[in-house]
Image (cartoon, helix red, strand yellow):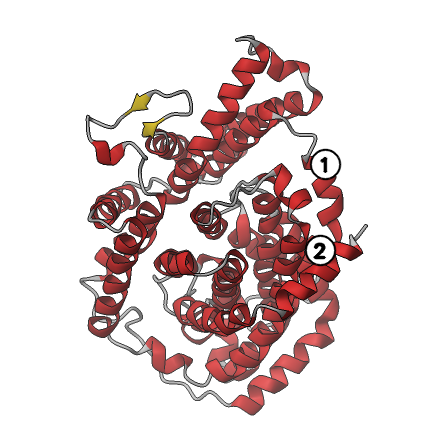
Amino acid sequence: MIDLAAFSDALSLLASNPFAWAVVPVGLLIGLVFGVLPGLSVPIAMAVFLPFTLYMDFLSAILFLTAIFTGGGFGGSVPAILMNVPGTTAAIATCFDGYPMSRQGRHNEALGLALAASTVGTVIGYALLFVILEPISRLVLKLGAPELFLIALAGLFLIAALSGRYFWRGVLAGALGLMIGTIGMSSSGVMRGTMGSIWMLDGISTTAAIIGLFAASEIFALVKSEYIVADAGAREVRLSLIARGFVQAFRNWYLVLRGGLIGSLVGTVPGVGSTVANLVSYSYARSRSPNRDAFGTGHPEGVVAAEAANSSSEGGSMVALLALGIPGGAGTAIMLGAFAMHNVTGGPRFISDNKDVVYAIIGGNLVQALLLAGLGLLFLRVAVTIVKVPLKFLLPVITTLTVLGSYAVSNSMVGPITLAAAAILGLIMKHYNYPVVAMVIGLLLGRMMEGNLLRTWQLSRGDLTIFLERPISLGLVVALILAVLVPFVMKRLKRRNNPKPEG
């Protein structure tokens, strides 16, 4: 049930904060630009501009970051449709039918379809979040220290499980993040990993580390390239035809609704996110369509199903962030960093104590979706030109922003040094196929997991069977075991069903 008093307070917050509305269009444009440039993904954009939120109030900061998230969700579909190069991993399935439509001269229609599906998908995701917010707030208040520790641990293992054949590398990356996240003075007064340096007592700057892992490491990887996309492929973009495709998407309203529901559901699972939602929705739409053979040849339904899901998953991922204080992916992991920068703790008490702020965040994002429709139409006129910008002009700007941003957080050289070290580590991890997202989430959850484990130890007086005595924690233990075992069982079954030919 919606709290009408809190809803009224949320409207007052939004109406009395003009700065929040000033940064939203800027955030949407930043997300669109970074989304349309393959290699410069939305998490990179959020990491680069995260330090600037330090000088904003909390509501404006979160709306700014979610605007980048929303804009990037659609921006990734532009190069996917025009050049068969997904701007973000969440636009992989968009390539399947979007690019064939472009080859057929229907790229304007495809861009309009993608924009409409992204807009409505975002609305569906946040509308569902608004409806289920109250029951979730009651549920999460029943979670104690044992449950919160296990939820965070299960999230790390789930991310590792989604790393495919690199499961244990995901586990190691998450463990490394946990170790780095606990450097400094612990809550019990013990110093760990400081190597005698007073600069390490407060721990590693998570903001600078995130910028390094996501942004700087990608910049290093792009140095040898002349263009982000070698084949710019100048194609005419006509606003009238894009608008016609936008309207056409509503003829497939059932696909938009179904994709939005799938994306919202998948997005609530930590570590899954928009990439999986994009592929699941596309696969399901193809399996249920009477024209399944048309998918992959330039079928509009494929574009609609894929884009509706990857955009609605944003609202789903906010469930774990707001209700549990656990990031569902790279984007929400960076948002959790913004929470920390403003001394706000996401988790069970956050919704009940700050319901007006949560409603304001949801309401602001619903308006963002409508703004995306207008800005997206205008942005598409220059999208192809942006893709053609040489890296020799783009990289210096991005490099300057990352260094200045890391320095602004710490007001010392500790930030840039952490940035450089994290960038090198990020390059090494990517080279050897270690998932960076697992490490970042471990880095952010290190203190939380340590604190909840310590409280669990104190509550049980050292008896760890407390994890098996509470119904919710017992269920989480079972889920954690399944997260570890399922990848191995599936791998064995696959080998059994597809034996290697003899000789």
SS type, badge 2 = helix
Q: Which residue is mark 1?
A: 139
Q: CA distance from mark 2 to mark 1?
A: 15 Å
SS type, badge 1 = helix
User: Residue at 70% of width from left, 42% of height from top?
Assistant: 137
Mark 1 neighbour density, 10 Å: few (under 14) some (14–19) many (20 or more): few
Q: Is 184 displayed left or right of 106 in the figure?
A: left
- Estimate the x, y position of residue 209 in percent, counting from the top left: 31, 45
Asked if residue 304 shows in the view, the reply is no
Measured along the vertical axis of the image, is residue 338 above or below residue 141? below
User: Residue at 24% of width from left, 44% of height from top?
Assistant: 418
Measured along the vertical axis of the image, is residue 2 above or below residue 68? above
On-image quarter of the C terminus: top left
User: Residue at 47% of width from left, 53% of height from top?
Assistant: 331
Mark 2 neighbour density, 10 Å: few (under 14) some (14–19) many (20 or more): some
Q: Is 188 displayed left or right of 2 in the figure?
A: left
As drawn, the label of residue 130 is 2
Q: Is 213 displayed left or right of 363 in the figure?
A: left
Q: Amino acid at mark 1?
A: Leu
Mark 2 or mark 1: whose residue is earlier in sequence = 2
Location of residue 215 by image quarter: bottom left
User: In this view of the protein, which residue sits in the foreground, 448 or 45?
Assistant: 448
- Estimate the x, y position of residue 143 in percent, counting from the top left: 65, 29
- Estimate the x, y position of residue 371 in percent, counting from the top left: 58, 75
User: In this view of the protein, which residue sits in the foreground, 430 or 332?
Assistant: 332
Q: Amino acid at mark 2?
A: Phe
User: Residue at 52% of width from left, 14% of height from top?
Assistant: 457
- Estimate the x, y position of residue 92 in percent, counting from the top left: 48, 60
User: In this view of the protein, which residue sits in the foreground, 137 or 254?
Assistant: 137
Location of residue 197 by image quarter: top left
As drawn, the label of residue 374 is none
> Which residue is outermost to the right?
1
